[in-house]
Amino acid sequence: MQVALLGGTGDIGEGLALRWAYHTTHEVIIGSRDAEKARRKANEYKTELESRGEETEIAGFDNKTAVKHANVIVLAVPPYHITETIETIADSLAEGDVLVTPATGIKRDDDGFHYHRPQAGSVTQLAADAKPDEVPLVGAFHNLASGRLADLDVDLNVDTLLVADDDDAKETIRKLAQGIEGLRPLDAGSIANAAEIEALTPLLINVAMNNQGMHDLGIRFR
Amino acid sequence: MQVALLGGTGDIGEGLALRWAYHTTHEVIIGSRDAEKARRKANEYKTELESRGEETEIAGFDNKTAVKHANVIVLAVPPYHITETIETIADSLAEGDVLVTPATGIKRDDDGFHYHRPQAGSVTQLAADAKPDEVPLVGAFHNLASGRLADLDVDLNVDTLLVADDDDAKETIRKLAQGIEGLRPLDAGSIANAAEIEALTPLLINVAMNNQGMHDLGIRFR
């Protein structure tokens, strides 16, 4: 597969890019609004992987060009940029492409972190509303601590939850997730079930903040 | 400690009653709106424990009387009975008592199970709003599968999350939770953080429904 990470210069994008490049043979492409930044980051990731004896080509492009080179497009951008990002790349999407959103809405107050649920029902639904009808969308990789993901020395040993209204697209992303060592994909049903997954992320932060020795938390269902 | 389980004749109440009676030396008291039902269930639990060589006294009373015998009162009732139950027992609460709520709001549609968040912000907050000011309340035991909890042959190996605005009360319930073998209590902060914990329960059901071989799910933070 050719996997483009739009926002692949940010925390979660970096971790996913490194893990796919390190654990799998998928082609990893970094996308950014700024093509120069995408190329710079792609080179940083290559250097990191070379230091581990992994010779991999990672390309960096502006978002539209990155999408043209990929058949899986991960929208690793903040929730408030999701709609705009999808509108920008819509014309570059082709039949057979799959969109993936790992974004969640979080707000903070004096008590801790809380789920900031958009009017649409979830950030995943927000992305689904913005996308072209013929391109399926999968919600996945919401609850992964970016620090842990980007540190290839750390065993993940966590679960990630998938939601989609298209079973084939969900299966494609399930396999893509399974390629990352220590990451177990679990099916959480349709996009209508996304809010409860997105709400997990602020909870993970609250638990990390309130319990000594816990940080970069993930979750296991058992 | 003397632990009263109001709604101790229902699923989650049964599991907590059996686990505390089996794993700890705390006195377990079953409360119900119907005293006769409470006594009958208490006897059933005693019989179950006797079959495992555990001789324990478990009393059954109407809710008000159960509260008078206890210093920890677990409101193991459905969310829509929380306010009424607290109002019924308010006069029976004494200084030093701690209220505990494991209730969460769930609704179901064709896609799956969803968190039904009350106007108050969470079911835990609903309970906090109904209780007397001088009695602290702790949210705990929200995400435990009742079947797994009530089957003493099954190792739990799951986490439970605590929220409270009173640190001493939270510590009391942390110790009480820790007494149950295989249950790890984690601090999730104040009651304002309860909604994200309550939302986990429908997610656990969705994951169980969509993945073969998964049932009675719990969660581990790691």
Image (cartoon, coloured by chain):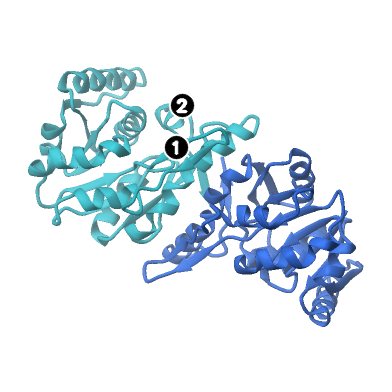
Chain colours: A cyan, B blue
Mark 1 neighbour class, 10 Å CA radius: few under 14, some 14 to 19, many 20 or more: few
Q: Is residue A84 left or right of residue B141?
A: left
Question: Which chain's residue wears label 2?
Answer: A
Q: Is residue A115 above or below residue B92?
A: above
Q: Which image quadrant: the C terminus of chain A?
A: bottom right
Residue B152 makes an appearance in the image: no
| Residue where numbered disc 2 is placed | A153
**Pointer 2 and pointer 1 on the same chain:** yes
Q: Is residue A198 left or right of residue B138?
A: left
Most distant residue in the left direction: A91
Query: Looking at the image, is mark 2 or mark 1 nearer the viewer?
Result: 1
| Residue where numbered disc 1 is placed | A107
Residue A28: % across, % down: 23, 33
Which quadrant of the figure has residue A31?
top left
**Who is closer to the viewer here, B64 or A207?**
B64
- What's under tag 1, amino acid-wise? Lys
Which quadrant of the figure has residue B80?
bottom right
**Who is closer to the viewer here, B83 or A133?**
B83
Q: Earlier in the sequence, mark 2 or mark 1?
A: 1
Residue B65: % across, % down: 87, 69
Residue at the image position 63 percent from the left and 29 percent from the top = A213
Helix, strand or loop under label 1: strand
Residue at the image position 76 percent from the left and 68 percent from the top = B88
**Who is closer to the viewer here, A41 or A200?**
A200
**Who is closer to the viewer here, A82 or A154?**
A82
Residue at the image position 18 percent from the left and 49 percent from the top = A131
Q: Which image quadrant: the N terminus of chain A?
A: top left
Q: Is residue A79 above or below residue B102?
A: above
Which quadrant of the figure has residue B29?
bottom right
